[in-house]
Image: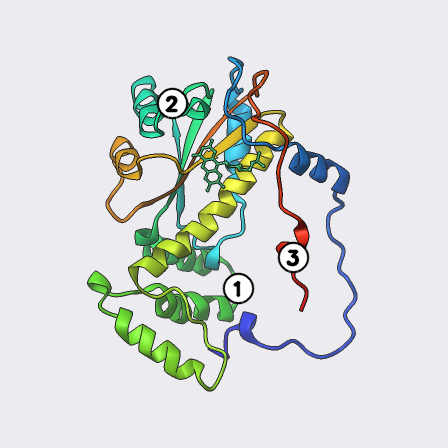
Amino acid sequence: MSKVKIFQPVEQKKREAAAAPATDSGAFHAVVDSRRSVRVYADDPIPTEVMDACLDAALKAPNSSNLQAWEMHHVVDPKKKAALVEACLSQPAAGTAAELVVFVGRPDLWKRNNDWMLQALNRLDNAPKSALQYYKKITPLAYDQGWMGWRTPFKWAITRWRGLSRPYPREPIGKWGMRMWVHKSTSLACAHYMLAMRAHGFDTCPMEGMDSARVKNILSLPRQAVITMVISAGKRAEGGVYGERMRFDSSHFIHRH
Ligand SMILES: Cc1cc2nc3c(=O)[nH]c(=O)nc-3n(C[C@H](O)[C@H](O)[C@H](O)COP(=O)(O)O)c2cc1C
């Protein structure tokens, strides 16, 4: 593991900040502050180019090992859309929406994507050795749970034993661990998508109030796929935001150690 660059300590010397693209923090906070979960939308459609830009923003979310074990299912077929609204328990946030996208985690596809990553690296003229090493050695150790999860008890035992004497990466372990693993990255894609929508002047509502088995059925997804959220989008209607934003005092949640 020590051969992989991201796990190597950097030289202890003074480091200057590198040039990074300029950003507009005011614009960013305006987007964050004005994003609200919208339960009733106006009839306005969302232009295709906005949908494309926001889905593209979702794909730029940070994700574990850059394995992109996610899918975004934009449901446009009217029959499927009606079925999806029903699977979302006929919530107005789904029923009145211009667009519905299902964010799906695909723990079953980590190996395919790992192979894609190795192929992409091998196409580079000078692929970093540590990156190749990472996708050949580390990711299989981390994500391969074995057929029917047979590695799970061994991973669990090895992790605990090795972790006694040194820092050792503990998760993901087993099929449930892999589900959690995809939920983390897919949730970040959801956040990117919702903020991008707001930046384009549209609104969203994330929904886990839905029947995930039915949603998977509508999208013909395999058993191993996990539904992270369904996100509706459109222009907020008058009264479509249910009240002021409520948050508990930040002192409960932000801890400094
Ligand atoms: C994982 C998740 C699931 C949610 N599910 C629903 C839902 O099924 N229906 C709904 O109306 N809102 C849903 N919400 C929206 C939350 O209720 C909302 O984010 C919260 O009340 C805070 O309001 P705000 O988003 O306007 O800041 C969900 C949010 C998240 C993150």
Quarter holding the C terminus is bottom right
Q: Nearer the viewer, mark 1 or mark 3?
A: 3
- Give me the residue at 62% from left, 46% from top: 248
138 vs 251: above or below: below
Q: Work out whether residue 131 or residue 2 is closer to the camera in this orientation and state it.
A: 2
Specify the amino acid type for callout 3: Ile
At label 1, the amino acid type is: Asn
Mark 2 = which residue?
76
Q: Is 248 above or below relative to 214?
A: below
Q: Give me the C-alpha separation between circle 1 and circle 2.
A: 42 Å
Disc 2 element: loop
- Crowding around mark 2 (Cα neighbors within 10 Å: few <14, some 14 to 19, many 20+) is few
Q: Quadrant of residue 37?
A: top right
Give percent across and percent down for residue 221. Answer: 27, 39
Q: Position of residue 177 (x, y in %)?
A: 36, 60
Q: Quickly name the residue at label 3.
A: 254
Q: In the displayed image of the protein, which residue is found farthest to the top?
A: 43
Say if residue 164 shows up in the picture.
Answer: yes
Q: Position of residue 136 (x, y in %)?
A: 39, 68
Residue lying at 48% horizontally and 46% vertically, measured from the top left: 187
Q: Nearer the viewer, mark 3 or mark 2?
A: 3
Which is more N-terminal, label 2 or label 3?
A: 2
Mark 1 or mark 2: whose residue is earlier in sequence: 2
